[in-house]
Image: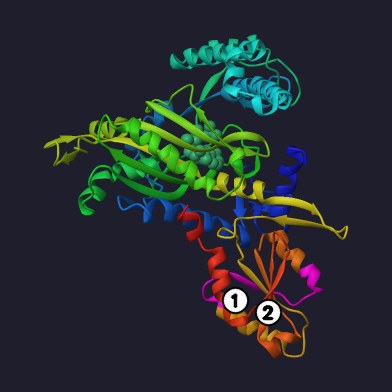
Amino acid sequence: MAQDDLLKKLISHSKEYGFVFPSSEIYDGLSAAYDYGQLGTELKNNIKSYWWAAMVRMHENIVGLDSSIFMHPMTWKASGHLDAFNDPLIDNKDSKKRYRADVLIEEHVAKIEAKIDKDIAKAKKRFGDAFDETQFRETNPNVLRRQQEIDGINAKFKAAMDVEDLDAVKQLIVDLDITDPDTGSKNWTDVRQFNLMFKTELGAVSGDSGVIYLRPETAQGIFVNFLNVQKTGRMKVPFGIAQIGKAFRNEIIARQFIFRMREFEQMEMQFFVKPGTQKEWYDYWKEQRIKWHNALRLGAENYRFHDHVKLAHYADAACDIEFNFPMGFKELEGVHSRTDFDLTRHEEYSGKKLQYFDPEENKNYVPYVVETSIGLDRMFLAVLSAAYQEEKLEDGSERTVLRIPPALAPVKAAVLPLLKKDGLPEKAREILADLQVDFNCQYDEKDAIGRRYRRQDAIGTPYCITVDHDTLEDHSVTIRERDSMTQDRVAIDKVHSIIAERVSMRNLLKQ
Ligand code: ATP
């Protein structure tokens, strides 16, 4: 399926089955805002639980936090967001469309990278098992030339952004002959900076004194509570604080469904470490996080690391974990080594000490921080896009199936009486009542059984339990598995444990 088609299909499938709706749709929607429907909410909650279990429950030295969205405005001065949380913006004078200058340049680079990938794929095919990708990258003249071109562009872009030379950024766009992706026009305005924070007013105070901001990241709530948690939890460095919550950014362009929204949810963890050990912990968290992703089996080939060329003002190392979304490889998660920047700045601006007394070293210091930060909505989109499949079946019919990992599936099991009579519904409801205590289930007695299976496939339900006339005699049911569509006959008293074993998060967390 073409990737563009996939995104369109996901949007309509999400709406049709109650995963994601456009926000305030009866008023024609609000750009870049979405509501999660009945199934979307379940999927989102399951992703959160998986993250929380892996990060907090499975790590003795990581604890949770739920800090408020509103924070003292000085927070954002200290964190640098007021002065530097900007995106370079450029308009096309013909199409009147607005773009992020850095994204235009990144997309240009991605096109060259795609050419390298193509060369490699071709060579792989030609040389078979004997192919050595590293050697090919280091010696093939075409790849070398393209890589040199990429390095040159990245270096120029970094140099320009480091000194905020926006004219040089514009010049780079002109020199690279970058055109408006929609219309092909090259009629660009100058590049200017745009601050992404949403402003609002606190209480009845108007004017500048009452201005506060909606948090653009959850991390700052963690930093300002660093000592509260460390002291009350008697935490010893290294330790982490994790938080799931909403963040808000007035994105310049937000066009790709739930990939880029102006209100979204982050799952962030700040890990406080001894200065000098940050590189070790950065590597550790890169490995932990990719393990968390791989356990879901969305396809290891759908992930890659991307090191940042231009480091944010607070970082000494940073990379993205990119996912192969329907729009191509894009950032899903960031792992950032944030140094002692945030805590030091909060010390400076608040006048309060934010230091840790290290009993082993017998001294105080401001810990360094390694952060993992993943967008919950982007993770949701990653799961959906890897799960969505249209299949032709052996009997010639078709089905749309969401192969969502069972532990994340919104509905774990559907209980289906074969007929709406002869005591089958009553028996089915008995089974349902038992399963419901532990799992989100559905009961469905409408339409032919084949259609009911299709409906459950379309929402990713891993197991369908069918109650038929034999059930009343032999106390057994049929369990149909979503992906293989195989059906097994099992005793009713085994159903709960079978479902429990197969949909358990244990299977993910133990990997
Ligand atoms: P991008 O380069 O795509 O704008 P970013 O580098 O600004 O992202 P971070 O500040 O590292 O993003 O935020 C951490 C995570 O939050 C990202 O990896 C992403 O998953 C998520 N995120 C950031 N902005 C948005 C958004 N507008 N909508 C949805 N998720 C977002």
Most extreme residue toward the right is: 396
Please say whether residue 469 is visible from this viewpoint.
yes
**Mark 2 near ligand 1 (CB under 8 Å)?**
no
Q: Amino acid at mark 1?
A: Val
Q: Kindly indicate the quadrant of the structure image that contains residue 105.
A: top right
At a point 66% along the width and 51% down the height, the residue shown is 387
The answer to whether mark 2 and mark 1 are in CB contact below 8 A is yes
446 within the magenta span:
yes
User: Of the numbered discs in the image, which one, if any, rests on residue 477?
Assistant: 2
- Asked whether, in this view, residue 285 is left or right of residue 477, the answer is left
Q: Within the image, what quadrant is residue 96 found in?
A: top right
Q: How many marks?
A: 2
Quadrant occupied by the N terminus = top right
Circle 2 sits in a helix, a strand or a loop, which is it?
A: strand
Question: Secondary structure beneath disc 1?
Answer: helix
- Which residue is drawn at the image coordinates 38% and 50% (left, top)? 68
Q: Label 1 neighbourhood size at 10 Å, few (<14), some (14-19), many (20+)? A: some
Q: Which mark is residue 495?
A: 1
Q: Position of residue 48 (x, y in %)?
A: 49, 54
Q: Which residues are magenta?
A: 435-452
Tell me the crowding category of disc 2: few under 14, some 14 to 19, or many 20 or more residues within 10 angstroms, Cα based.
many
Q: Is residue 498 above or below residue 30?
A: below
User: Of residues 505 and 426, which is closer to you in this image?
Assistant: 505
What residue type is disc 2 on?
Val
* In the depicted structure, whether residue 110 falls above or below residue 14: above
Quick check: can you spot residue 215?
no
> Residue sitting at 75 percent across and 86 percent down?
469
